[in-house]
Structure formats: C-alpha cells, structure tokens
Image: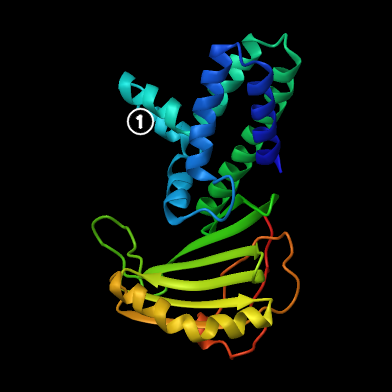
Amino acid sequence: QSLADLRTEMNLASRLLLHDSQTSKQMGKLETLLSGFFPQEGLPKAENLASFLRDGGMNYEARLAQSLHQPESLRKLVETDLKGQLLNTLQFLQEESGQIPLQRLASAVKQNLQWIETQQLNTYLSQVNDTPYQWDIPYMVGGQMKTMHLSVQPDTSSKHQNEQTTQRSVAGHKVLFLLDLETFGQTRIDSYITPHSVDATLYIENKDAIKHLRPRLGDFQQRLQALGYGNTHLDVRTFHGTMREKRPDFHNSQPASDLESEATPHLFRRQI
C-alpha cells in the first residue's frame, strides 16, 4: 500500500505545484524509475522484475562502495537506483518542507524507504542463514494494490566443491511465486529452473480457469522450448487452502513433478 500512497501523493503534489519546475522535475524522475519496476496496471513483466532486483535498492550501499572512486558511476547510481532516488527525493522535499503537499509526500517517501530496508534485511538474513531469497513485489490490478511473493533458492543438492575457489556449483534454482490474479484467484507457481530445463506446476484457485488453461499448456511448453529450455514439464492443479501473508520456504519440499496430481501444495513453513 505504501507504493500506492507514494504515487497518490506524487500526483497530488504535481497538480498543486504545477508552477514549481523543480518539484515537477523531481517527481518526473521518481515516476520514471517507479514505472520501470512497477507498471501502473497489471503484473510486472520479466524485464520489470529484473530491473527491480538489480536497481530496487536492495544492494544500494554495496554498489555505492564500489563506485566511490568513480564520480560518473556514482551519479548514475543515485539516479537509477530506487533507494538512491528516494533518498534524493527526500532531501529535496526536506529543503522545501514548508508546503503541506510536500510534507505528506515526504512521509510516503519515508514509508517506501522503510519497505526497501526491510527487503534488505530479509536478503541479509537469507545470505547468513542459507535460506531462500525472498521479496515482496507490489502490483496493481483493477485499481487495487496487491503483493506478489517471490522466493528463489539456488539448488546445491547435486553440488561439487571447487577445491581452488571453495565455491559450490549451482545445478539450478527453485523459484516460487505467490500472487492473487483476477481470473485465476489465489495462485502459486512452483518451479525448478536450470539453464536448459523448466519444471513448473501452477496451483490455481479458480477451477474453471484450470479447465481453460490445461489444454494450452502444450503451446506454452513449445514457447519455452523455443527459448532454449529443451526439457520442460508443466502442470496445473487446484489451489487448496488460504494464501496467507507469510513467506514460503523450499526446505524439504518436493519437486513439482513429484507431487500427486491434486495434492495440497507445500505451503508456508517459516516466517521471517
């Protein structure tokens, strides 16, 4: 909801302060960046997610440290990273703090900075505890703000140790999406992805949507194969239970293809 509040306050400030070119310019920069991550309507596309995971603020301080001796890279980072742009916007608003619309906007910016820092903490805990990386990604559907839960866990179950670098190879990644869709209802996408294969099961609440989708899995499979995923397995099943606001875990979970056809999906065992 904090993202929706931010955009509402940005639009309000822009309308009330049309004469203020500096405010309009700053709002334009921030909205351009937000639109690259979070479309005004509908689910984010693959490029939106990639941009968010790269430039959404989770690695801002580490990237700053890498750019300290490169002024041009430093300036570009502040402009293109969401946390950098929010901090830049907050500084601008504090300098113009006498106007009520800008005070409300500053509060919304602070809420979004807190949201990013929560994501940063979750990422740090995942690294320390060797647990799945987890992100909450907002999206807008039918005028309502919703949250997509994304979990990614490198699969090192068939790993080997590199004696020289002490790094472990990754066979693939377990990727899980949890989201609420207008047509499908509550939806879980449980997948295992390698450079050349995809094994994915969709758990969908709307049984009519399952009947509509199942005959089309073959077409989707062919599209994946055309992209280079020669070995693909896709399935669609009924979503059982209630999607709660908890984070999913992959520990001890079975591959999607090993589950029985109408089994209740392995749901949330851990919450950060």
Identified by mark 1, the residue type is Gln
Q: Residue at x 35, y 79 (%)?
A: 222
Q: Residue at x 46, y 33 (%)?
A: 81
Q: How many marks?
A: 1
Residue 149 rendering spot, x and y as whole percentages:
61, 58
Quadrant in the rendering for residue 87: top right
**Is residue 207 toward the left or the right of residue 42 in the image?**
right
Vertical relation: 3 (above or below) 93: below
Front one among 70 and 7: 7
Residue 258 rendering spot, x and y as whole percentages:
52, 87
Quadrant of the snapshot with the C terminus: bottom right
**Is residue 133 toward the left or the right of residue 164 in the image?**
right
Q: Is residue 58 visible?
A: no
Q: Residue at x 42, y 73 (%)?
A: 157
Q: Residue at x 66, y 22 (%)?
A: 15
Quadrant of the snapshot with the N terminus: top right
The crowd level at tag 1 (other Cα within 10 Å; few <14, some 14-19, many 20+) is few
Quadrant in the rendering for residue 110: top right
- Name the residue beneath numbered marker 1: 66
Front one among 230 and 156: 230
Q: Residue furthest left?
A: 164
Vertical relation: 85 (above or below) 252: above
Residue 151 rendering spot, x and y as whole percentages:
54, 61
**Is residue 195 toward the left or the right of residue 111 in the image?**
left
Vertical relation: 91 (above or below) 213: above
